[in-house]
Amino acid sequence: MSTVLIPIPDRDFDPTEVAVSWRVLTDNGHRVIFATESGAPGVADDIMVTGRGLDIWSALPLVGSLSLVGLALRADKNGRDAYAAMLDSPEYRHPVSWTAATLNGVDAVLLPGGHRARGMRSYVDSDVLQRLVVEAFARDMIVAAICHGVLLAARSIDPDTGRSVLYGRKTTALTWAMERAAWRLTRITRFWDPDYYRTYTEAPGQARGFMSVQSEVTRALEDPADFRDVERGTPHWRLKSSGMARDTATDSRPAFVVDDGNYISARWPGDTHTFAGVVSDKLRP
């Protein structure tokens, strides 16, 4: 049995990327250890669980519970079911703290994402987690990152080289096309919180998208071409690029995962079954 460490923030992580990864790994006989900043069980972004809060009428009484945009962007049934099951699991109810987390006895580190700034910034910016990621790469362990988890890896600087641990690696992450599409929509429908879908926004004078996940990750790479996205004309490229279709345990067609040896990356919740499956396969003897 292999052991996978999954660090998450105390709140606002994506329910699908965490829970589906947990379900795939545990269903395949692997042990999962969760780590949160406080050492208490974390809580996912409630909007991504329920879908409530993304429609223009969300703040109104009575009709506020109705959802339209939220239904399209929230976790699908697979993600919600996995999240509900994960909440009752002993490993989720008893995480370790980030500072207490160790790689001893751990075979892989999986870095999920999320986008809501109030919770995700502490995760992506954490010196503790960045040092842990550097150590995992130094040990040549399996490291897997999806969505903003890739940004955490990109910000993890190897002190011996002064470069990101992703320098020289092939990777994907949440693409600017996906991030921009969701941001443009939710900045209108959630007008009182227009940057809900942007963890980091541009400072005055910076080009639009400069602080997007794709742009920042790309700046950490040896070659901009090392950032990979779905190529037009490849099998199922329309499905993979739609931002609407999600993979399942039996259908990997919508997913896009980059396998770079002991480093695996993916873009968004719609890739998670396939992403976690690749990790699981690499852990098998």
Image (cartoon, helix red, strand yellow):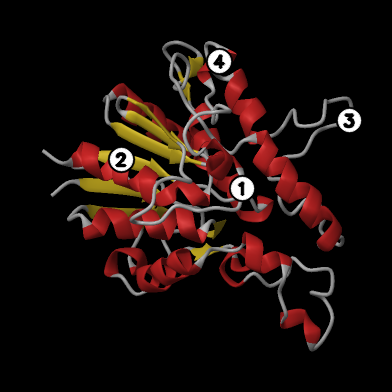
- In whole angstroms, how far apart are the C-alphas of marks 1 and 4? 22 Å
Q: Quadrant of residue 263?
A: top left
> Which mark's residue is nearer the viewer, 3 or 2?
2
Q: Nearer the viewer, residue 123 or 50?
A: 50
Instruction: Please name the residue shown 31% across and 22% down the image.
Output: 138
- The residue that disc 3 covers is 204
Measured as percent of width and height from the top left, residue 262 is found at 30, 28
> In which quadrant will I find the C terminus?
top left
Q: Earlier in the sequence, mark 2 or mark 1?
A: 1
Tell me how far mark 3 sits from mark 4, CA to CA.
Answer: 27 Å
Instruction: Determine which of the numbered discs, if any, sits on residue 225 in the image.
Output: 4
Name the residue type under label 2: Val
User: What residue is disc 2 on?
Assistant: 278
Residue 37 visible in rendering: no
Let me know if residue 76 appears in the view. yes
Mark 3 or 1, nearer chain start: 3
Q: Residue at x 62, y 19 (%)?
A: 219
Left or right? Give the position of 82 relative to 90: right
Mark 3: which amino acid?
Pro
Mark 4 secondary-structure assignment? helix
Examine the image and state in which quarter residue 260 appears. Answer: top left
Q: CA distance from mark 3 to mark 1?
A: 29 Å
10 Å crowding of disc 2: few (<14), some (14-19), many (20+):
some
Upstream in the sequence, badge 4 or badge 2?
4
Residue at mark 1 = 243
